Image (spheres, grey):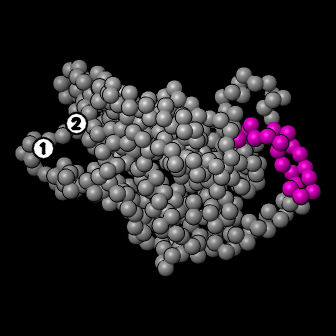
Amino acid sequence: MRFLTSGESHGPKVNAIVEGFPSNLPVNKERMQEELFKRQGGYGRGRRMQIEKDTFEFGSGVRHGKTLGSPIMMEVNNDDFKHWVNIMGAEPITKEQEAEMKRIITKPRPGHADLVGGMKYNHRDLRNILERSSARETTARVAVGALCKELLHALDINITSRVTKIGRVTDDGAYDYAELSTKNTESSVRMISQEATKEAEAAIDAAKKAGDTLGGVVEVIVENPPVGLGSHVHYDRKLDAKIARSIVSINAFKGVEFGMGFKMAETPGSSVQDEIKFDSEDGFYRSSNNLGGFEGGMTTGMPIVVRGVMKPIPTLYKPLMSVDIETKEAFTATIERSDPCAVPAASIVAEHMVAIEVAEAILDKFPSDDFGDLKASLELYNKRLSEY
C-alpha cells in the first residue's frame, strides 16, 4: 500500500490517493467522517476550525460501500478558498497584478519551513512554501488513516490515542483501554483525568493571553495487533522504525518513544525486558509491556504503545524576530492564523499515522488483493501461532 496527498492550506481542496488496498472491504463513510471531525476538535483550536467543515468525499475506488481494489481517491474541499481565489488561484497573473497583490510573504517565521523551503525551491514569495507545509495537509492523512482504521476494525484490531502532557500538565497514569476510548473523547484536551483537563485548559488560556503557544506529548495504543508484523532482517522493514518515521513526519513533532521510552536509560535491564510466559490457553505472552509491543522490529502481540512529543506551534501572536529576504532587515515575523495549542488534534493525526503503518504491515504480510482472502489468511496464521 502507498498513498500520496496534495493540496495547499488555502487552496481549493486537499486530496489523498491510496493504492494497494484490497477489494471487497466494507467501509463505513460516516465512521470515517467522524475521524476527520475529531482532528478539528480540542481546546485551544483557532478560528480556522470553525470555517472548515472537513467533509470528505470518495472520488474513486469505492462502489456501493465496498472497496474495488483500484486506487481510492478522497478529497476535502477548503471552504475558505472563496476568500483566497485571487491569492491562491491556479491561473497566471500579470506583473501589475502581482505588484498589487496583498499577502506576499518575505519575512520567514522562525521554526517553520518558510526560509529553508524558499531557498531550496527558489521562491521569493514564501507563501509558496507555507501553504503546503501547513498542518492543513494532515487532513488528507487522517482521511487515509480513517480508511486504514476500517481495515483494522474489520480485523478486530483497535486503536486509540490520548494526550499525556500539555505544557507542564501531565496525565500519563495507567489506563484501561475501554475507559480510555471513552474518556479521551469526553475530555476537551483528550486526557483521562478531569483534574488534569481543567489544569490543561487553564494553561492553554494563559498561553493564549500571553501570545504564546504550548506543546505536549501524545500517546497511541493499538490493541490486538497480530504477532510478527514487521521484520528483523532489514532496517527498513522494522515496523517500530516505520512508525517512528511516520510520527516525526507530523508537523511540529520532534521525538518518539515506545513503551517505557527514554526512562529505559535510567532503568536496569532486569526491570526493562518483558519476561516471556506460556499457558495452554493463550500460548506465549509477555508479563509486562515495557518495550511497547516490539522486539526486534516486530510486534509481540502485546499492545503497541508509542508516544510522540510535539513542540509548541511556532506561529506566535507575540512574534519572534526574523529577517526580510528582500531587504535583509530585521523584522518581527509574519503572523498567520494559529492555535495556542494543537496537541489534542495532533493526537488524532498521530493515531491515524500509526493506523496507516499497521495496516500497511498487514497488507504486506498477507494476501491483499481481496479482503476475504486476507482475513482467512490472518485467521490461519493466528491458528498456526496458537499451536507453536
Position of residue 47 in the picture relative to residue 66 (left or right): left
Q: Residue at x 48, y 68 (%)?
A: 29
Is residue 73 part of the magenta span, yes or no?
A: no
Res 153 quadrant in image? bottom right
Q: CA distance from mark 1 to mark 2?
A: 11 Å
Residue 123 visible somewhere in the drawing = no
| Crowd band around label 1 with a 10 angstrom C-alpha radius: few (<14), some (14–19), many (20+) | few
Quarter of the picture containing the N terminus is: bottom right
| Crowd band around label 2 with a 10 angstrom C-alpha radius: few (<14), some (14–19), many (20+) | some
Looking at this view, is 93 or 158 the one in front? 158
In this rendering, is residue 326 above or below 16?
A: above
Q: Which mark is residue 105?
A: 2
Give the residues in magenta: 274-292
Amino acid found under the numbered disc labelled 2: Ile
Q: Residue at x 63, y 41 (%)?
A: 306
The image position of residue 385, as x and y in percent, is 84, 59
Q: Secondary structure at mark 2?
A: loop
Amino acid found under the numbered disc labelled 1: Met
- What residue does disc 1 label? 101
Is residue 286 part of the magenta span, yes or no?
A: yes
The image position of residue 43, as x and y in percent, is 42, 41
Q: Secondary structure at mark 1?
A: loop
Q: Residue at x 33, y 38 (%)?
A: 338
Q: Residue at x 53, y 62 (%)?
A: 147
The image position of residue 94, as x and y in percent, is 10, 49
Res 175 quadrant in image? top right
Looking at this view, is 24 or 221 the one in front? 221
In this rendering, is residue 300 above or below 339?
A: below
